[in-house]
Amino acid sequence: MTARIADAGFIIALNSSDPGERSWARGVLGKWKAPFVTCEGALVEAAHFCSPALVTRLVEDGDFVVAFDLAEQIGPVRALLEKYQDQEMDLTDACVVRMSELFPDCRVFSVDSDFKVYRRFRDRTIPTVYPPDLE
């Protein structure tokens, strides 16, 4: 089964003020079916930019599941941050890239075009699903 990895931007888009982005995210959530896996960083980032109540409800309802332990993955995450320091990769993006390596059969859902630059397993593109205007 293909793992569905949610970046913070995808979670934020579920409550976006942009109707196209919100429609895209909600359509994806309906089409791909929960649960989406994510990291705590993505949830915290999403809660900061939209609604903590919404994010906690999505976790409580089982739409999003934390499937990443930063303490266990700190070495590879730090290596990604160093590799992409010129891109100013943030911690959440590094965790999501690492998750794409831990779940090789995956799709990352994001509104962040940086995932077009990032690579997993050193040189492989990350299979990412974007809103139509970013594809």
Image (cartoon, rainbow, N blue to C red):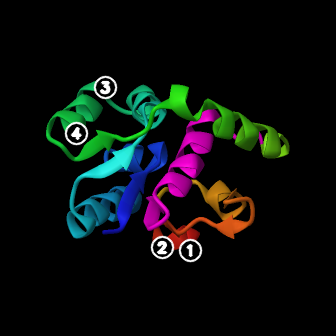
Q: Which residues are magenta?
A: 88-108
Label 2 with label 1: CB-CB less than 8 Å: yes
Q: Position of residue 117 (x, y in %)?
A: 72, 61
For label 2, the residue is 132
User: Upstream in the sequence, badge 2 or badge 3?
Assistant: 3
Classify 10 Å Cα crowding around label 2: few (below 14), some (14-19), many (20 and above): few
| Label 1 vs label 4, nearer the camera | 4
Calculate the distance from the C-alpha at mark 3 to the C-alpha at mark 4.
10 Å
| Label 3 vs label 4, nearer the camera | 4
Nearer the observer, 113 or 23 = 113
Label 3 with label 1: CB-CB less than 8 Å: no
Calculate the distance from the C-alpha at mark 4 to the C-alpha at mark 2.
24 Å
Residue at 67 percent of width and 60 percent of height? 121
Q: Is residue 110 above or below residue 129?
A: above
Calculate the distance from the C-alpha at mark 3 to the C-alpha at mark 1.
29 Å
Circle 3: element type: helix
Which amino acid does the dot numbered 3 rest on? Answer: Pro
Which amino acid does the dot numbered 4 rest on? Answer: Leu
Residue at 22 percent of width and 55 percent of height? 34
The reply, left or right, for residue 94 in relation to residue 68 is right
Mark number, residue 102: none
For label 1, the residue is 135
For label 3, the residue is 52
Label 4 with label 2: CB-CB less than 8 Å: no
